Image: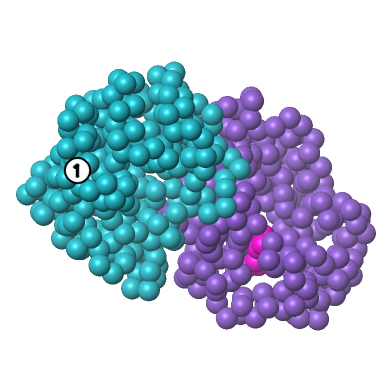
Chain colours: A cyan, B purple
Amino acid sequence: MTVKQLTLPELVSHCVRLGIPGVGLWREPVQEYGVEAAAALVRDAGLTVTTLCRGGFFTTEGWLDSNRAAIDEAVTLGTDTLVLVSGGLSPSCPDLPAARARIAEAIGELAPYAGERDVRLAIEPLHPMYASDRCAVSTLDQALEIAERFPAEQVGVTVDTYHLWWDDRAPAAVERAGAAGRIHSFQLADWTTPLPAGVLNGRGQLGTGSIDLRAWAELAEKAGWTGPVEVELFNDELWARDGVEVLEETLERFLAV
Amino acid sequence: MTVKQLTLPELVSHCVRLGIPGVGLWREPVQEYGVEAAAALVRDAGLTVTTLCRGGFFTTEGWLDSNRAAIDEAVTLGTDTLVLVSGGLSPSCPDLPAARARIAEAIGELAPYAGERDVRLAIEPLHPMYASDRCAVSTLDQALEIAERFPAEQVGVTVDTYHLWWDDRAPAAVERAGAAGRIHSFQLADWTTPLPAGVLNGRGQLGTGSIDLRAWAELAEKAGWTGPVEVELFNDELWARDGVEVLEETLERFLAV
């Protein structure tokens, strides 16, 4: 998604050229390309699919079918992790406690289906500014509280610096998640202001914002994380530029921080 | 600030007409009108000044003089509460732990000065989306943790629904703050999306957004709050309308929720 201006074949070939060993994919471009075809493309290039984004949106109609399909797609792609953006308020979940209860319940229904297919669900707490319209799970503590009801190999969390950096309780939660084997995905983005309208597409290029990304990487490492580190930037300015240039710049910055 | 398109005399006369017994003032319009003159205007109309907004911004140069002046202005206006927006990151406070340490230290320097003048400092936690540029104090727990180092009659907190509504730990913190006599100000605004660019001026009119304002009012009441309930809406759309109409609408909605 960081370089969504690239086609899937372009993305894959430039990852290979640059020595990037894996890539996190999003459902929409994969579906457009064809799930089987995308799986073959990535596999034949020798890349791993680090995660599939995203399942979730449990507070809206049709969540069960949509999430089962996402798990099936993860299996086809050969990734072990489906990231969940859990959903916000809705007519049937008009307040946060109701939304959070629904989310926990939905994950309970989904976890065995995922577990049987060796796919781990990674609950991603989103920044509190998304609590009403995207994700009622706003802190890592809340995500863990839900995950801990299920086996770690079925349900864990996504640690994304953009969403968690402000939270003084997050470091302890990362440690707790790591000790329980529940960090299933780790993502970097920097925090820059002013935020754009809608606050969706202003995630900062690594090293240009307020987050001490190196400290977060060390925190994850200390918590036992040895998996891939993804960079997930939604950024209108980056999307308007040449995708290959952005990919190369992102790799440089990744190595620098 | 909710009806900043009104002059101070207009605001005061319409508050009196509508039976609104008190008003929270901001430093800039008060300074423009003249602090003594503003004090006389409000006092002669029989209104109370509920709070003065705002001191703070402790992470930038010149904070001490500016905050002492704000306390002096509060004394002149006859209000017992100065609301603090504590400041974000800065060259001398490049990360959140540094900013939070500076804020606690600054409040320690300021508290006796305020206490000697019977002015209470009310630390306002701001929504985490302001952590980098406005206020590194993002939760009521963090605000209380600082306030509790000082006597309650010197330092307490502001409970503002807009900033706290998403936080599942906030209700317990409100209870704890109330039990210790540390709620010094209580403010309402609703949460509406999409957020505007810069995320400053999109606070929702009461009853138009995601927050259960009645539940928050009950929470504050249960915590022992018997003081004024302020409505603080920063909203470009409301500011573009006739100020008297907005004031009347706000009062209606206030009574309704």
Instruction: Name the residue nearer the viewer: A236 or B125.
Output: A236
The quadrant in which the N terminus of chain A is found is top left
Badge 1 density bin: few <14, some 14–19, many ≥20, Cα 10 Å: some
Q: Does residue B173 sit above or below B116 in this rendering?
A: below
Q: Position of residue B113 (x, y in %)?
A: 74, 40
Whether residue B155 is visible: no
The image quadrant where one finds the C terminus of chain A is: top left
Q: Please tell me whether residue A250 is drawn above or below residue B220 in the rendered image.
A: above
Rendered position, A130 above or below A165: below
Tell me residue B199's x, y (percent).
60, 52
Q: Which residues are magenta?
A: B228-235
Viewer-proximal residue among A187 and B170: A187
User: Where B144 sits versus B249, above or below?
Assistant: above
According to the picture, the residue beneath numbered tag 1 turns out to be A37
Residue A166 placement, left or right of B200:
left
Question: Which residue type carries mark 1?
Answer: Ala
At horizontal 52% and vertical 40% (from top left) the residue drawn is A240
Tell me if A172 is positioned left or right of A120 in this view.
Answer: right
Residue B96 shown in magenta:
no
